[in-house]
Amino acid sequence: MVSMNRLDSKRHAAVVRCLVEGCSIRSTVRMTGVAKNTVSKLLLELGASCVKFQNETMRDLKCKRIQADEIWSFVGCKEKNVTTEKVERDGSVWTWTAIDADTKLIPCWLIGTRDAGCAAEFIQDLAGRLANHVQLTTDGLKVYLNAVYDTFENNIDYAILHKVYGRDMPDASRYSPAQCIGCEKKDAIGSPDPDHVSTSYVERANLSMRMSMRRFTRLTNAFSKKLENHSAAVALYFMWYNLGRVHQTLKTTPAVAAGVADHTWTVEEIVSLMDSN
């Protein structure tokens, strides 16, 4: 196995290429021959660089229509198995995400709990990145309303999309989600355009997260064991999603479409961020 101080840029890129394509750390080890601790250390260092770069770059964005949502995962163990010793680190973890409906850019995210405090922090972070008056759509989670009003007051067009679900399916279909039987649109602040009241793009982006990061795969033992590794993996994923992966509908990356970048980034360029810190 190869250690961190013996990795050249080519081996760095090989490891990162596996990680951004959804491979677990152990499968990355098997494919690249790089030691497990080395892969983990590289993930942590590069994740921190990706957080710093995106936090500085995703500013003064000319977005017009934003959708926001949360996606569940867990670290260490599920909430029902959390003990007194584990409560500070383990259990349910929610990733709050926002997406520009036009460019598919993810301008910000927040990893935390699903409560009013995280909602306020997330919405304030989003507001600080926008240059324009925007239309925002969220689901029916109640903590959004106060967070949006306290942050934007009346300087936003905000709508809530509440989905109505049928009864749970019998045991034969226990792993299938309940059927959505309708949607209710509610104007919360301002005058949102009803044709653009939707959470479809952000929900599809969250599905991409679950499909593209082994840590988010349901019903497996691939969940994150440490919160710091989980956070680093999410940061790296969004770096690749925003700047490196060409989207089929856009024919370019979200960052290029949004004017944040002037070219599609390579894995090698992402790896080079560690050199600038």
Image (cartoon, rainbow, N blue to C red):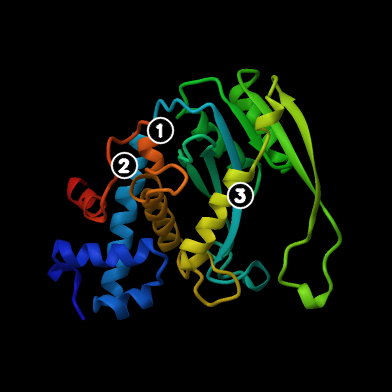
Q: Position of residue 145 (x, y in %)?
A: 70, 33
- On the question of residue 235 being in view, the answer is yes
Expressed as whole percent of the image width and height from the top left, the position of residue 236 reads: 37, 54
In the rendered image, residue 273, in percent from the top left (x then y), is placed at: 23, 48
Mark pair 3, 2: CA separation: 25 Å
Residue under label 3, please give it. Answer: 203
State the residue position of label 1: 258
* Residue 112 in view (yes/no): no
- Which quarter of the figure has residue 98? top right
Q: Residue at x 21, y 64 (%)?
A: 12
Q: Counting residues from the N terminus, which is met first, the one under dot 1 or under dot 3?
A: 3
| Figure check: 214 above or below 193 | below
Classify mark 2: residues with Cα within 10 Å, few (<14), some (14-19) or many (20+).
some
Q: Tag 3: Cα neighbours inside 10 Å, few (<14), some, or many (≥20)?
A: some
Quarter holding the N terminus is bottom left
Q: Residues within 10 Å of mark 1 (few under 14, many from 20)?
A: some
Q: Amino acid at mark 3?
A: Glu
Residue closest to the eye, 179 or 49: 179
The mark that comes first in sequence, 1 or 2, is 2
Under circle 3, the secondary element is: helix
On the image, numbered disc 2 is attached to which residue? 53
Q: Which of pointers 3 and 2 indicates the residue nearer the eye?
A: 3
Element on which disc 2 rests: helix
First in sequence: mark 3 or mark 2? 2
Residue drawn where x is 79% and y is 78% of the image: 172
What SS does tag 1 mark? loop
Q: Residue at x 33, y 49 (%)?
A: 244
Q: Amino acid at mark 1?
A: Ala
Task: Tell me the amino acid under the disc marked 2.
Answer: Phe
